[in-house]
Image: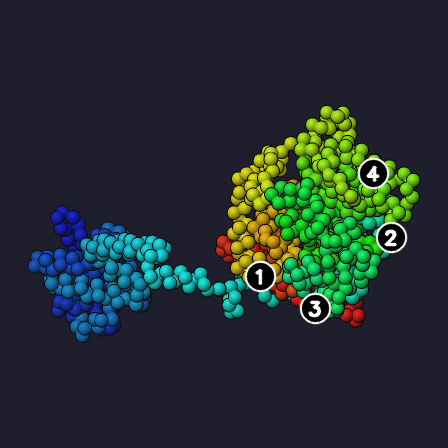
């Protein structure tokens, strides 16, 4: 094989290098012919290598070759042909500048001629023709993919590429500007078509379409969340329909009766817990909506007639047909709660929003708190589970806030300075016993400037001594009333009203200064945290309350910054955090309302927030047709219940490893934010869920917001609890690890055949 090399220059620059290969025809056919004619194998063996990164000559390079075709090619002596070889491997050619070697294959578009190739070059025209043939052969080579051939072809003309690049940039910029202007126009809503689209979007309810799939793409441990094996919880026996674990009557009788210890919380041991579903009684129905529920309760929901007989004269409750009717009377207000409240309103400013939160000790069926709601006052009512049986259950069935509780030896589960008003209407609490310990506890939870109302024994004992089965000479009642008045004076309470059976005291606004002036500093409690009350013993000492900024009146106080935050008394909470929390929960509640259209309606009257935080969930939901029990877990890092009360809301401390102090089926809607993450490794998730099921009414709703891994565990459990549930993405998108689990408890009632698991 003979080889000649040529270089072509243009304007002093080297544009093209070429090599001329002369091969025997046997390379093609295995024959031997004379290589005499130009344009034979010699032409097919001519290949060009531009002095640029491109491997295929451009048209401009080929024009340079044609221009140089007129120059004679010098003759060279023939070179001997290479020795015959049996190798079938393709031969190679090499680019002089880039030292790049590529395999050479014959072009399928130029079949071999019948003549043998010549070892000499016939002329420059043969070289040019060979270059074109070789370029075409290289492009069509079977070793090159279509994409490679396209890329090589697209690089053959740098000038064209530059022109196309400029045009592409101009086109892209033009499109960007066009769509930016179009988007701005659409967002403005000025276009007729766009305004129609906006109206249709607002009027269209996309959340109720049954074919939408809201399942998230997360699963736990590689398990498909749509197909999960779960534990099935059995129903408890029907005799547990009204079971209250921490106020169980049988267990209570094992504790001493002194100071009502046996009526306090006594929760079952781990081995005694019922891990089954508390059934609803036969005939259970959804309570009436508010305000009808204030006056009527279905008999099947609380089938206890004892109070209709025992309190018949006092107008507590009457049985009519298949419902209980509540006339609104009480022991000390048989003519109705409204008339009684009107009497109190002559002294206590209910109308201007000064009084928002009230505490009713020994509430009965909570008629006082029920009628105070008409005056925008939220009352926390409590009474023990005693011989009156279901007085707190009646209160909750009526839609009035209430818990099972008693003034015994343990502090009330409320922060210091919580209530604007406290009330006792013949509550039968021995106020003067134990050195006035119970009055000291009322003083602790009463806000400076707050009111305490006491009606009934021992007030006005001279008038009622015969009714109380005492003689006129019996000095015990007189001594008791005098003792109460002395303790009230020690607490710096001013008596501002006394008429008939009712006395009203007002706590001084500067009670701390009063205590110091009167030399009562020795009676001040030596405690670091006055709000640390869970299972703490009562003390017969005065709890100091820090001086705070003036509390605004309701409803302004609902969203105003609470004094505890303004003065830095709530650790870890600043004004900025408080404002951000308000905005965040406005967004969250709007999301809940899109998911469940019944939120905000009379369908959900009794609502519980199991991890209330700053109370913003309840604040956004605030409405005359519903109320929220804000629960602050005792293990929470931030003690925010005092802030909740300063906002004009009510709540309670509780540890969710234990049962809540309420009857079964007392809440319509339960909300929990981050609760299960908080209680991880603290207690069993199943125990918390079973307690939620106990206090949730049939067909009630649950909204859980938590991390997706935690909610997957929760979802596995609730699938065996007769709940329907759906896991939804965060409102900000599916990439947020926080998710929402929405559940609805199915309607079912118990039977005698079902036993405890």
- Residue 757 lies left or right of residue 622; in this view the side is right
Q: Residue furthest bottom?
A: 114
Query: Taking 219 as reference, is 339 above or below it?
Result: above
Q: Mark 1 or 2 closer to N-term?
A: 2
Callout 4 secondary element: helix
Give the CA distance from mark 1 to mark 2. Answer: 43 Å
Q: Which residue is mark 1?
A: 598
Q: Is disc 3 in contact with disc 2, using a CB cutoff of under 8 Å? A: no
Circle 3 sits on which residue? 748
Is 698 or 17 nearer to us in this picture?
698
Q: For the residue carrying disc 2, how many other residues have a C-alpha within 10 Å: few (<14), some (14-19), or many (20+)? A: few
Q: Is residue 578 visible?
A: no
Based on the displayed image, in which of its 4 quarters is residue 597 positioned? Answer: bottom right
- Residue in the image at 24% along x and 51% along y: 97
Q: Which mark is residue 253?
A: 2
Tell me whether the residue at label 4 lies in contact with that at label 2, contact meaning CB atoms closer than 8 angstroms.
no
Q: Is residue 373 left or right of residue 732?
A: right
Residue 481's label in the rendered image is 4
CA–CA distance between discs 1 and 4?
A: 50 Å
Tell me the mark number nearer the camera, choosing from 1 and 4: 4
In the rendered image, which quarter contains the N terminus?
bottom left
Task: Measure the alpha-carbon separation of dots 1 and 3.
Answer: 21 Å
**Towards the viewer: 665 or 633:** 665
Q: Residues within 10 Å of mark 1 (few under 14, many from 20)?
A: few
Q: CA distance from mark 3 to mark 2?
A: 32 Å
Residue at point 61% right, 61% down?
603
Mark 3 crowdedness (10 Å alpha carbons): few <14, some 14-19, many ≥20: some
The residue drawn where x is 21% and y is 67% is: 24
């Amino acid at each position: 094989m003979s080889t000649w090399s040529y270089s072509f220059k243009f304007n002093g620059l080297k544009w093209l290098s070429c090599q001329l290969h002369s091969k025997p025809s046997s390379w093609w056919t295995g024959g031997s012919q004379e290589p005499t004619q130009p344009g034979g194998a010699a032409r097919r063996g001519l290949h060009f290598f531009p002095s640029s990164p491109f491997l295929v000559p451009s048209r401009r390079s080929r024009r340079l070759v044609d221009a140089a075709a007129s120059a004679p090619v010098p003759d060279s002596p023939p070179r001997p042909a290479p020795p015959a070889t049996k190798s079938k491997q393709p031969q190679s050619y090499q680019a002089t500048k880039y030292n790049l070697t590529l395999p050479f294959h014959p072009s399928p578009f130029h079949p071999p001629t019948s003549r043998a190739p010549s070892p000499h070059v016939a002329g420059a025209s043969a070289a040019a023709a060979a270059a074109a043939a070789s370029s075409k052969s290289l492009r069509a080579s079977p070793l090159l993919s279509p994409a490679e051939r396209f890329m090589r072809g697209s690089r053959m003309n740098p000038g064209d590429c530059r022109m196309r690049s400029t045009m592409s940039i101009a086109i892209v910029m033009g499109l960007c500007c066009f769509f930016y202007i179009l988007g701005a126009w659409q967002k403005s809503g000025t276009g007729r078509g766009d305004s129609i689209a906006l109206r249709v979007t607002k009027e269209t309810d996309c959340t109720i379409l049954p074919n939408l799939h809201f399942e998230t793409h997360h699963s736990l441990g590689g398990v498909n969340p749509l197909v999960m094996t779960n534990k099935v919880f059995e129903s408890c026996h029907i005799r547990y329909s009204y079971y209250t674990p921490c106020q169980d009557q049988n267990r209570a009788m094992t504790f001493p009766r002194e100071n009502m210890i046996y009526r306090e919380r006594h929760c079952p041991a781990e081995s005694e817990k019922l891990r089954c579903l508390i059934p609803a009684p036969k005939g259970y129905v959804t309570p009436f909506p508010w305000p009808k529920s204030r006056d009527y309760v279905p008999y099947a929901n609380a089938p206890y007639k004892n109070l209709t007989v025992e309190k018949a004269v006092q107008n507590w409750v009457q049985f009519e047909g298949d419902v209980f009717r509540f006339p609104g009377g009480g022991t000390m207000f048989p003519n109705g709660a409204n008339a009684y409240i009107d009497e109190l309103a002559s002294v206590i400013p209910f109308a201007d929003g000064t009084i928002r939160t009230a505490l009713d000790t020994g509430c009965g069926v909570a008629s006082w708190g029920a009628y105070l709601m008409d005056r925008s006052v939220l009352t926390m009512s409590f009474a023990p589970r005693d011989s009156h049986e279901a007085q707190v259950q009646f209160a909750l069935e009526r839609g009035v806030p209430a818990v099972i509780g008693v003034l015994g030896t343990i502090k009330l589960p409320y922060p210091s300075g919580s209530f604007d008003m406290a009330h006792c209407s013949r509550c039968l609490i021995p106020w003067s016993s134990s050195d006035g310990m119970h009055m000291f506890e009322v003083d602790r939870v009463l806000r400076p400037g707050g009111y305490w109302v006491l009606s009934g024994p021992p007030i006005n004992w001279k008038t009622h001594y015969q009714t109380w089965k005492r003689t006129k000479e019996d000095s015990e009642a007189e001594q008791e009333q005098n003792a109460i008045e002395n303790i009230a004076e020690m607490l710096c309470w001013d008596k501002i009203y006394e008429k008939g059976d009712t006395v009203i005291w007002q706590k001084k606004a500067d009670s701390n200064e009063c205590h110091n002036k009167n030399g009562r500093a020795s009676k001040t409690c030596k405690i670091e945290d006055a709000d640390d009350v869970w299972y703490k013993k009562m003390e017969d000492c005065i709890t100091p309350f820090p001086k705070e900024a003036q509390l605004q009146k309701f409803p302004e106080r609902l969203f105003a910054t609470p004094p505890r935050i303004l003065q830095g008394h709530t650790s870890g909470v600043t004004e900025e955090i408080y404002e951000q929390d308000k905005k965040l929960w406005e967004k969250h509640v709007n999301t809940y309302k899109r998911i469940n259209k019944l939120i905000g309606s009379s369908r959900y009257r009794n609502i519980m927030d199991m991890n209330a935080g700053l109370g913003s969930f309840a604040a956004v939901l605030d409405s005359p047709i519903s109320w929220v029990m804000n629960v602050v877990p005792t293990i929470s890092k931030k003690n925010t219940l005092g802030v909740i009360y300063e906002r004009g809301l009510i709540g309670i401390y509780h540890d969710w490893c234990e049962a809540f102090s309420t009857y079964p089926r007392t809440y319509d809607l339960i909300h929990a934010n981050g609760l299960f993450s908080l209680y991880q490794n603290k207690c069993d998730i199943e125990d918390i869920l079973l307690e939620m099921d106990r206090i949730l009414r049939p067909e009630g709703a649950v909204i859980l917001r938590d991390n997706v891994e935690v909610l997957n565990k929760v979802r596995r459990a609730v699938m065996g609890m007769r709940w329907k549930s759906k896991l939804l993405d965060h409102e900000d998108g599916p990439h947020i690890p926080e998710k929402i689990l929405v559940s609805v408890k199915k309607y079912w009632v118990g039977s005698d055949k079902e036993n405890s698991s």
